[in-house]
């Protein structure tokens, strides 16, 4: 159990840090997502080759129908991460994060409703967590000189859409992991991400040649993909050791790390000018995580 909690905390850090490279990239959001997937796929193939090739784990059934669900997860994740990148571009890490973090209640609610991981009476804690997260999101939505009202509204919309997508993908991840598929899930998920992102990009831009162009612009999404692969592996290990709702809720601590990065590293919001609002939002963010834990 301790190992499961430890893995979930590490995942929360990675989920915060893997968003940082996007701050330095101007690449098309969908193309960026595809290159994240390319790194994720390459890493997944390497991990599976080592684990199965050296007999560290029994090889999983690569032809199970459960992998269709994993492929669907990849498509949903592409829409989520593309919206994730657009939201960061529009409103920055600090403002974007708290709206995106509604993925926590979304994923937890699905796990509670369909996987019977907790008693129904504890749904009250879930509602309290969602309420605290909403208040925190409002408090962190501080207007800056370079964010107009229209950009802020659209940024919040994309962040909320990403939250729903990520909550759904966490739910699917838990279902397939419960069937014993860990490493094969990595393969199908990453492959689905690459293919679906490439298709969406070609439909969007009518520039199929761009998906094959290798440049230094691809280094940043490749870094994100490597971190996401690590986080995904650890999250699945965590799911096998503790309840999925518990693991998923702990990973929502990424809200705290992202806030700190956005405010103190990228200076997206003036801490001195808005310290009362920031500290209050921070308290509500921590409270939301605690409430979600009590729900499990």
Image (cartoon, grey):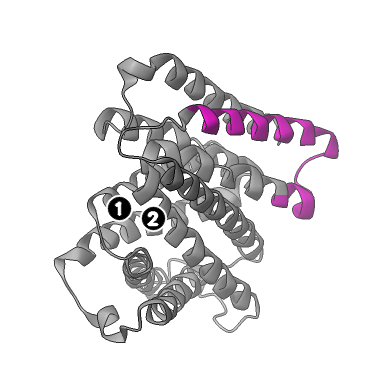
- Residue 192 in the image, given as x and y percentages of width and height: 48, 75
Residue 9 shows up from this direction? no
The residue that disc 1 covers is 22
Mark 2: secondary structure:
helix
Q: How many marks?
A: 2
- Picture quarter with the C terminus: top right
- Residue 84 in the image, given as x and y percentages of width and height: 44, 54
The residue that disc 2 covers is 85
Between residue 156 and residue 59, name the one nearer to us: 156
Between residue 9 and residue 168, name the one nearer to us: 168
Q: Is residue 244 left or right of residue 100?
A: right
Q: Is residue 111 magenta?
A: yes
Q: CA distance from mark 1 to mark 2?
A: 7 Å
Q: Is residue 12 left or right of residue 210?
A: right
- Residue 229 in the image, given as x and y percentages of width and height: 39, 59
Q: Is residue 217 magenta?
A: no
């Amino acid at each position: 159990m301790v190992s499961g909690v430890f893995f979930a905390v590490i995942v929360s850090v990675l989920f915060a840090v893997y968003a940082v490279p996007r701050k330095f990239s101007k690449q098309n959001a969908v193309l960026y997502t595809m290159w994240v997937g390319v790194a994720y796929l390459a890493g997944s193939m390497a991990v599976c080759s080592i684990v199965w090739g050296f007999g560290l784990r029994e090889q999983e059934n690569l032809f199970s129908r459960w992998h269709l669900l994993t492929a669907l997860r990849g498509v949903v994740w592409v829409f989520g991460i593309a919206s994730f990148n657009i939201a960061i571009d529009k409103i920055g890490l600090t403002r974007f994060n708290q709206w995106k973090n509604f993925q926590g209640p979304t994923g937890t609610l699905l796990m509670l409703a369909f996987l019977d991981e907790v008693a129904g009476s504890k749904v009250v804690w879930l509602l309290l967590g969602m309420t605290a997260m909403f208040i925190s999101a409002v408090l962190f939505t501080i207007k800056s000189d370079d964010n107009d009202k229209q950009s802020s509204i659209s940024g919040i919309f994309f962040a909320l859409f990403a939250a729903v997508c990520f909550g759904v993908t966490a739910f699917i991840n838990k279902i397939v992991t419960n069937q014993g598929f860990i490493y094969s899930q990595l393969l199908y998920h990453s492959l689905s991400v690459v293919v679906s992102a490439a298709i969406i990009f070609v439909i969007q831009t009518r520039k199929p040649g761009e998906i094959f162009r290798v440049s230094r612009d691809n280094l940043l999404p490749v870094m994100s993909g490597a971190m996401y692969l690590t986080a995904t592996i650890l999250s699945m290990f965590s799911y096998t050791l503790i309840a999925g709702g518990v693991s998923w809720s702990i990973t929502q601590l990424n809200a705290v790390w992202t806030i700190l990065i956005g405010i103190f590293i990228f200076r997206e919001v003036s801490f001195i000018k808005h310290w009362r609002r920031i500290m209050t939002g921070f308290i509500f963010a921590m409270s939301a995580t605690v409430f979600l834990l009590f729900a499990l």
